[in-house]
Amino acid sequence: MNTDQDGYKSVDYIKLSVVTMQAVKEQNEIIIAQESNIKELENRLSKIESLLAGKRFTSVSK
């Protein structure tokens, strides 16, 4: 933000655009990594559920 000799404020939107685009790029990289982690966790959960479905659980009575 700039202030001129009369006290008026202004913003250099070109510089702001560069900063904004970099932030969007960084967020996109984070989102891609999180999507990959979610997919891996979903695969692991599916395997665990398959293993549990193949086992029979019996209750123990006293």
Image (cartoon, grey):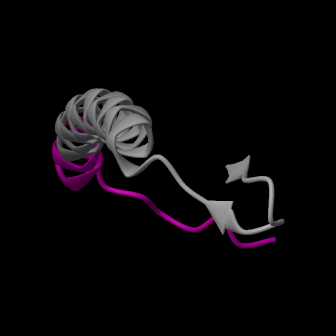
Q: Residue furthest front?
A: 5
Q: Residue at x 21, y 30 (%)?
A: 36
Q: Position of residue 43 (x, y in %)?
A: 17, 36
Q: Position of residue 39 (x, y in %)?
A: 18, 38
Q: Nearer the viewer, residue 33 or 56?
A: 33
Q: Nearer the viewer, residue 33 or 15?
A: 15
Q: Is residue 5 left or right of residue 2?
A: right
Q: Position of residue 38 (x, y in %)?
A: 29, 41
Q: Position of residue 18 (x, y in %)?
A: 33, 32
The answer to whether residue 57 is above or below residue 62 is above
Q: Nearer the viewer, residue 27 or 44?
A: 27
Q: Residue at x 81, y 71 (%)?
A: 62
Task: Tell me if residue 58 is in the magenta stretch.
Answer: yes
Task: Tell me if residue 57 is in the magenta stretch.
Answer: yes
Q: How many marks?
A: 0
The answer to whether residue 29 is above or below residue 2 is above
Span highlighted in magenta in the image: 47-62
Q: Is residue 6 left or right of residue 14?
A: right
The quadrant in which residue 25 appears is: top left
The quadrant in which residue 51 appears is: top left
Q: Residue at x 57, y 68 (%)?
A: 59
The quadrant in which residue 42 appears is: top left
Q: Nearer the viewer, residue 23 or 54?
A: 23
Q: Is residue 30 left or right of residue 46?
A: right
